[in-house]
Image (cartoon, rainbow, N blue to C red):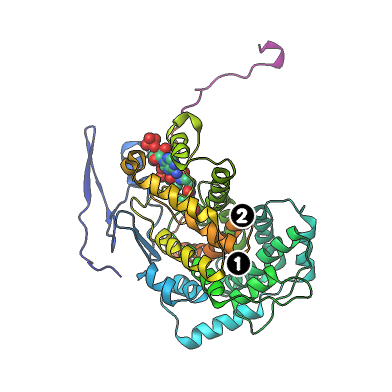
Amino acid sequence: MSADDRELAPIRLEIGDKVIELATTRASQGNHGMVITPLLQQTGLVSLDPGFLNTAACASQITFIDGDAGILRYRGYPIEQLAEHSTFLEVALLLMRGELPAARDLEAFETRIDKHMYLSDDFRQIFSVMPRRAHPMATLGAAVNMMAGFYPESLDSLDPAAVSLATVLMLAKMPTIISYIYRRAQGNALLYPKHGQSYIENFARMTFQLPGERFDAPEVFYRALDTLLILHADHEQNCSTSSVRLIGSAQANLYMSVAGGVSALSGPLHGGANEAVLNMLSHIRDNDIDPKDFMNQVKDRRSGVRLMGFGHRVYKSYDPRAAIVKRQADAVLEALGVKDELLDIAHEVEQVALSDDYFIERRLYPNVDFYTGIIYRAMGFPASMFTPLFALGRLPGWIAQWREMIADPAGKIGRPRQVYVGYPKRDYLPLDQRK
Ligand code: CMC
């Protein structure tokens, strides 16, 4: 796998009067690793790295990002090529198996997925139990957890056949679950998947078809949705993926590990940003705020306002996914005949930000979430459904990373250390002696 298999010399580290030697792991691309595990035993020190700014939790072969150059590759393939030529299910196989599938393997996989998109009537109960105003991410997390109860034959994390079944069941049922969350919020009856329709067509029809009507969308609609899912499919050790890996490191089953990923994704600093961007743009429009004034609020630290959809822990240049989505937004809106003033506001806000010293100095650029909501909105999704769409896209990445973690012979349960800064020992005071 490595372009250069030469051994990397160990690192000699001088700490006080001790010199310790730390082994290294050569990266095929990007930053090499220094194995700090012996540090504690040899020096009594733990490494402290809040937010994991400089901590690799694993070695992985799945996704490569060069944040300075704006590069993203799945299993070596540039995101731009996959977005243009591939399909979501093909990318899912690529992420999980490591290679682009042969035509017959892809077809067999699609057929297997197609067979399992159905949800039983018992499972469908959850959508009427949850209140209509429940946030879709709350229902989605509950539904993914519930799968562990419904499919007990696929729970054994160490049995490859069970994991393969859980993988297919999750990929197959997720679009159905997400469409049902939307329909329930709309007060519409739940529809069934249809054999013979593609994954994306089934998802769109189950979501949008109105009673007594046909659902038809132009090819550009399906292609854009498929592409957006591809763009979200993996992003190495982000917050939700790291959560999935951490939960799975306890050998928790795939469903419950992924449910943890759904929870992490719901946060506005992560997947919830796409919904927050749309709310921000609507706020700017509804209050007739000049983008320059809005930017002044963002730069005023006391305001607590962030420019949502901007900035990234890893990308210090234009997020390559955002570049694709931005191009797509103009094309899709035009093809769907949608005129959205929020797109104009987004362009304006971006321009103001990219020429402002605050953003230039901090190397803050639009991330994937900046323009996606505008496309989803043009397709008919309300803002509250944007993060579930992100979750559907990220699902193959969560699964691939979980599978890589569980199959790693060097794998260990995740258990960070801490630096304790609380009270030293003190004695219990009875209630009547406390002030
Ligand atoms: N608006 C204004 N200032 C920002 C922003 C922003 N969106 N992002 C970062 N900064 C500033 C931040 O205040 C800090 O300034 P200073 O050095 O003066 O303290 C500096 O830039 C570095 O930011 P940070 O918060 O230390 O960076 P981080 O790597 O911890 O956070 C981030 C990354 C994505 C959470 C953050 O950029 C952010 O909150 N962005 C807005 C939310 C967002 O769009 N999230 C989606 C991320 S991409 C898709 C995904 O992962 O789901």
Read off the residue under disc 1.
156
Residue 288: quarter of image: top right
Residue 427: quarter of image: top right
In the rendered structure, which disc, 2 or 1, sits on the residue that comes first in sequence?
Answer: 1
Q: CA distance from mark 2 to mark 1?
A: 36 Å
Q: Is residue 379 magenta?
A: no
**Kind of element beneath mark 1:** loop
Residue segment shown in magenta = 421-435
Q: Residue at x 55, y 85 (%)?
A: 108
Label count reads 2
Q: Which mark is drawn over residue 383? A: 2
Observer able to see residue 170: yes
Q: Residue 12 in the image: state x and y as whole percent.
A: 21, 45
Nearer-the-camera pick, 267 or 8: 267
**Are there few (<14), some (14-19), or many (20+) residues within 10 Å of tag 1?**
some
The picture quadrant for ligand 1 comes to top left
Please state, as top left, top right, bottom left or bottom right, where the N terminus lies in the image.
bottom left
Q: Residue at x 24, y 32 (%)?
A: 16
The amino acid type found where label 1 is placed reads Asp
